[in-house]
Image: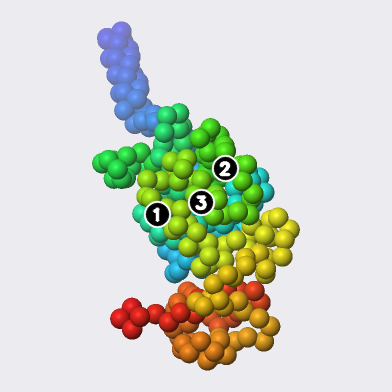
């Protein structure tokens, strides 16, 4: 009888221990999956571009970078800024806003950086994407200095923007036959040649000689927009519009267009 009781007790203890072990296994927390670490490509900070109000704002934002690149590469700051204005629509093109690409440089063979796809000459073409516009300006300099077809440009004087503009077309930078004149017009209108003069240590106020006194005027000491408007019989508002001026501020040596716009402009 005693043996039977002992046997029953042992069975109860054994069954109890098995149940506790089962519950322990069932209640054990599930093993968490390892956290996947992000690569630098995933965590890098991208410069968020904003729309530019006008060309003057673009120039103010990037003139220092253009002059820095001129110092490093020898490409006139005026040319770099004019190309940036033209290629990016003053910083407001989809490519510049989405990709910080201000010069429309495509991926080309061997490009290992970021990329984005846009419809251009063909559908879904690959363009370079940058984390900051500064890198776009740097890449523009590298692009021109490392391709043999552009090397002849660097024999030109650094302050001869007209020769550089025409040379870019000769080298095949753009297919638009008016490309050189478009660059020259931008450089003249916004006096971008002044930044070349600053880098070269010249007097930027007399860096450009005004040869056509009929439709242009070079600001002298004591001039105001009002006095100039009276002299050329054009309103201050129209004078500002004609020259893309946001304020009434003038500086000595500044070149203003003075020919009145057509009434239906």
Q: Which mark is residue 217?
A: none
Element type where label 2 sits in the image: helix
As helix, strand or loop, the secondary structure at mark 1 comes to loop
Q: Which residue is mark 1?
A: 178
Q: Is residue 90 left or right of residue 252?
A: left
Q: Which residue is mark 3?
A: 165
Point 48% across, 90% down: residue: 233
Q: Residues within 10 Å of mark 2 (few under 14, many from 20)?
A: many
Whole-Å distance between the Cαs marked 2 and 3?
9 Å
Say what secondary structure mark 3 lies in: helix
Can residue 122 be seen at all in this image of the molecule?
A: yes
**Dot 3: few (<14), some (14–19), or many (≥20) neighbours within 10 Å?**
many
Relative image position of residue 214 (x, y in whole percent)? 52, 78
- What x and y, as percent, mark residue 206? 67, 68
Residue 100's spot in the image, x, y percent? Answer: 45, 50
Nearer to the camera, 8 or 85? 85
- In which quadrant of the rendered image does the N terminus lie? top left
Residue 20 visible to an observer of this rendering: no
Name the residue beneath numbered marker 2: 153
């Amino acid at each position: 009888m005693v043996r039977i009781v002992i046997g029953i007790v042992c069975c109860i203890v054994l069954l109890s221990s098995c149940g506790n072990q089962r519950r322990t296994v069932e209640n054990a927390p599930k093993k968490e999956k390892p956290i996947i670490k992000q690569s630098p490509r995933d965590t890098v900070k991208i410069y968020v571009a904003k729309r530019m109000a006008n060309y003057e704002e673009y120039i103010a934002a990037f003139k220092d970078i253009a002059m820095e690149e001129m110092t490093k590469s020898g490409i006139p700051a005026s040319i770099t800024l004019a190309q940036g204005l033209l290629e990016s629509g003053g910083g407001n093109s989809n490519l510049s806003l989405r990709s910080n690409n201000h010069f429309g440089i495509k991926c080309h063979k061997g490009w290992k950086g970021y990329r984005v796809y846009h419809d251009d000459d063909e559908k879904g073409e690959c363009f370079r994407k940058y984390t900051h516009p500064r890198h776009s300006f740097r890449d523009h300099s590298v692009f021109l200095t490392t391709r043999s077809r552009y090397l002849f440009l660097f024999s030109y004087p650094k302050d001869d923007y007209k020769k550089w503009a025409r040379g870019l077309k000769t080298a095949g930078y753009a297919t638009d036959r008016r490309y050189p004149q478009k660059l020259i017009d931008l450089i003249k209108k916004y006096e971008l040649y002044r930044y070349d003069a600053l880098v070269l240590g010249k007097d930027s106020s007399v860096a450009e000689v005004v040869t056509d006194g009929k439709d242009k005027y070079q600001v002298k000491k004591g001039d105001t927009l009002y006095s100039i408007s009276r002299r050329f019989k054009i309103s201050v508002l129209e004078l500002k519009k004609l020259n893309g001026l946001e304020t009434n501020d003038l500086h000595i040596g500044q070149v203003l267009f003075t020919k009145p716009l057509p009434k239906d402009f």
